[in-house]
């Protein structure tokens, strides 16, 4: 059973934010906040984008793009995996059949 959300403080680009978070998701929240802080610092330190709002938008766009790429890759894997598993199962069955006919125990 999920426990109620509790306030958690995270620091992003030198600013503290208080966020309600269930205890079981606290580690993910801290990891997410650290990733966001690192990415925002990288964009800020590159000096091409000025202003916290613009930095946040650039990082959000980059993270959204990475998520879409990962989503597409996962979808492709999910489509291909059953075919690949079937091909492997067929190859194993074929080899087992050959082994049984030949009376051998190995390759």
Image (tube, rainbow, N blue to C red):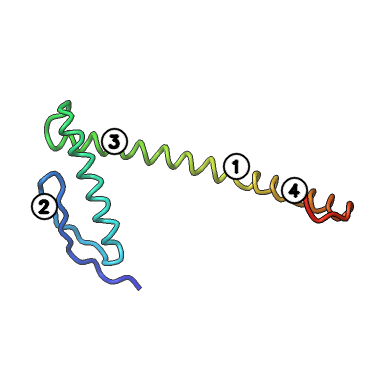
SS under mark 1: helix
In this figure, which residue is indicated by the disc labeled 4?
A: 90
Q: In which quarter of the view is residue 44 placed?
A: top left
Alpha carbon of mark 3 to alpha carbon of mark 2: how far?
A: 22 Å
Q: In which quarter of the view is residue 26 placed?
A: bottom left
Q: Would you say the residues marked 3 and 4 are in contact, meaning their CB atoms lie under 8 Å apart?
A: no
Alpha carbon of mark 4 to alpha carbon of mark 2: how far?
A: 57 Å
Residue 61, disc: 3
**Local crowd size for mark 3, using a 10 Å CA cut-off: few (<14), some (14–19), many (≥20):** few
Q: Would you say the residues marked 4 and 2 are in contact, meaning their CB atoms lie under 8 Å apart?
A: no
Percent of width and height locating residue 57: 22, 36
- Which of the marked residues, 4 or 2, is nearer the chain's N terminus? 2
Extreme-top residue of the structure? 48
SS under mark 3: helix
In this figure, which residue is indicated by the disc labeled 1?
A: 80
- Which of the marked residues, 3 or 2, is nearer the chain's N terminus? 2
Q: Nearer the viewer, mark 3 or mark 2?
A: 2
Q: Would you say the residues marked 3 and 2 are in contact, meaning their CB atoms lie under 8 Å apart?
A: no
Q: Nearer the viewer, mark 3 or mark 4?
A: 4
**Local crowd size for mark 1, using a 10 Å CA cut-off: few (<14), some (14–19), many (≥20):** few
Horizontal relation, residue 18 to residue 100: left or right: left
Q: Nearer the viewer, mark 1 or mark 3?
A: 1
SS under mark 2: strand
Q: Nearer the viewer, mark 4 or mark 2?
A: 4
Q: Is residue 89 above or below residue 61?
A: below
């Amino acid at each position: 059973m999920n426990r109620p959300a509790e306030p958690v403080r995270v620091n992003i680009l030198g600013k503290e934010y208080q966020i309600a978070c269930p205890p079981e998701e606290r580690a993910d929240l801290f990891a997410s906040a650290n990733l966001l802080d690192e990415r925002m610092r990288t964009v800020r330190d590159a000096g091409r984008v000025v202003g916290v709002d613009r930095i946040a938008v650039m990082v959000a766009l980059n993270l959204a793009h990475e998520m879409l790429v990962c989503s597409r890759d996962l979808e492709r894997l999910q489509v291909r995996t059953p075919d690949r598993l079937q091909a492997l199962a067929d190859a194993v069955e074929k080899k087992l059949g050959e082994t049984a006919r030949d009376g051998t125990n190995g390759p």
